[in-house]
Structure formats: structure tokens, C-alpha cells
Amino acid sequence: METFQLFSSSASGFGIFDEAAQHSPTIPPPPCVEVLASEVPSSAKHNVESVNLDGVTLLKGRVSTQQVFGLSNSDLIPGKYEGGLKLWEGSLDLIKALRSDMKAGLISFRGKRVLEVGCGHGLPGIFALLEGAAAVHFQDFNAEVLSCLTIPNLNANISGKSQASSSNLTICDKAEVRFFAGDWSGIDKLLPHVSTDDNRGDGYDFILMAETVYSVSSLQILYNLIKKCLQHPDGVVYMAAKKYYFGVGGGTRRFLSLVEKDGVLTSSLVAEITDGSSNVREVWKLAYK
């Protein structure tokens, strides 16, 4: 599969979006914290629904922004709420792409370390856990999303209601599952598996992320986090997102421009979804050159 190339060596940025990113107001991020699996508020209402993904059924909750944050229904409010309560299309695209690569024998989660970045519902990470991952760590900007949605979703899927595996409880009892909240600029200080100059073999075997590249101002921070956390030399990133996020300037192509210019990772297109229901969506795979 051909690798991605968007820019020649003489190409520059994207004009108006570069200027907009430079003048974006800075909002102090919340502190980075680990959220314990026991920290589910008793008042949280978690109405479970099933999601069928080409034969595999996962369970997800439905929680309102009004209930959790006291906000009217909104996709996101920069610096306060980053959309984690909504089930975005990209997370489902990501699971389908992972299943396809598993069936083709290209990847296996068994015994691997997995980090889901910007997890929200956490379905891709839950899928990896049910497929035998040794460790799955979930990261989201908001601790409230983890405690009110991600953790209940995980509990629902390992309680025997999910069709993904008949031995879910056994698998998950043996795995290390942890939850981390905070901004990408500082969350690496909490994550247990971070690749360092002294130990480049540490890090995550898989980094999964869906709909994380919508904001131009956060793309470099996200990319820096990936390089800190991805196991060298065999770690793989799966990224699902829209090709362009109109009105905010982000998208897969804008993010991949950073990857290409940096020259550390290579990228290949796994899937393109043009179902007419939204902007063109893509799934990309990143790996060390």
C-alpha cells in the first residue's frame, strides 16, 4: 500500500488555518489525573444500547452533557468539554478497520499494550481488551467522561452481555485496565508506558484514536504525545477521522502533513468511507520508518 505524501520539500502551510491557529486563545487545561474504575458516580444514569459492527456487538451508554456537565447538548466547548459523550462515526470506522486487519492476519492484540487517546465511549479500546490485550489504557480530556461513560461502558461489555467473547470476564481480570484524564500536553507524565531515550522499547504497541484531529491548534501536541508513547520500533498507530473538518481547519490530511514533515513515522491509508452521511472519513495506519 502506498505511503502518504502531501507536501514537497518546498511546500508551506495551509494559509488561513495557520494564522487562525496562531491566534487561538489559550485556555488552561484541567489537571492530569488518574481516574479509578470505582469512581463512577451513583447518580449517573447509563442507558445501555447495542452497536452491531459487521457481526460483533458492543454495548455503549447514552449520557447527556446536561446531566454530566450542566451544559445544553453540545458537541464540544474548547477547554471545557471536548465531545467525549458523543459516539462519533470515526470510532466505529476504527473498529471495523481493526477487525479487517485482524482477519487478514496483519495485527493481533493478544498480549499487547494499547492506549486509546481521546477515548470518549472507549469502544475501540474495549474491543482491543476483548481481543486479548494485556493492558488497555484509556485517555480522555475530561475525567467526567471517563467516570460517567467510559468505565460504565467497559463494565457493560465485560459483564457477559457483549457477544465479542464468551470469556470476557477471564480476559479482563488478567488485563491491566486504567483510565487517565487530562490534556495531551501533560498526560504522558502519568501514563505508565512512555518510550524514553534510555528505554525506547517501552511504550504502547498500539495507539488508537478516533476523531482527535479536528482542532488545528492541538495537532502538534497530539503528535508529540504519540512519539512519546509509541513503542519503538514496532508500535503502530490507527487513526480514524474526517478528511477535513470544515470550519475548524483540522482533518487527517492536515495531521499527516506534520507526520511527513517530521520524517519519523510513515503513514498508509487503511480505509476510506464515502457513504454520503458526512464528510469523507478515513482510517490511517502510522508506523516507524
Image (tube, rainbow, N blue to C red):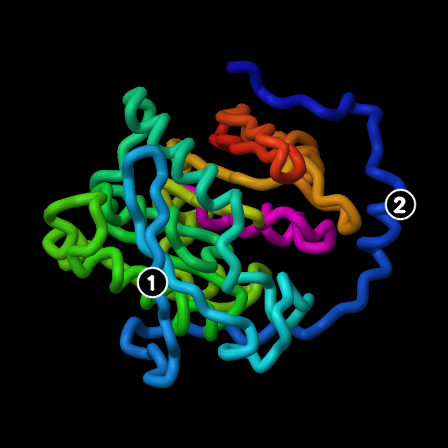
Q: Is residue 220 magenta?
A: yes
Residue at 49%, 31% in the rendered image:
285
Q: Residue 7: image x %, image y %?
A: 75, 25
Residue at 44% from the left image edge and 42% from the top image edge? 92
Q: Is residue 104 above or below residue 29?
A: above
| Residue 262 disc label | none
| Number of marks in picture | 2
Q: CA distance from mark 2 to mark 1?
A: 42 Å
Badge 2 marks a residue whose secondary structure is helix
Magenta stretch mostly in which secondary structure? helix
Amino acid type at mark 2: Ile
Tell me the tag on residue 48. 1
Does the segment drawn in magenta span residue 93? no
Amino acid at circle 1: Val
Highlighted range, magenta: 212-231
Q: Position of residue 225 (x, y in %)?
A: 54, 52
| Residue at the top extreme, as displayed | 1
Image check: 155 left or right of 251? left
Q: In this rendering, would 233 be left or right of 253?
A: left
Badge 1 marks a residue whose secondary structure is strand
Q: Which residue is found at the position 84% from the left and 25% from the top?
A: 10
Reading the image, the residue beneath label 2 is 16
Q: Are marks 2 and 1 in contact (CB under 8 Å)?
A: no
User: Does the rendering let one see residue 19?
Assistant: yes
Q: Is residue 131 above or below residue 188?
A: above
Q: Is residue 151 above or below residue 31?
A: above
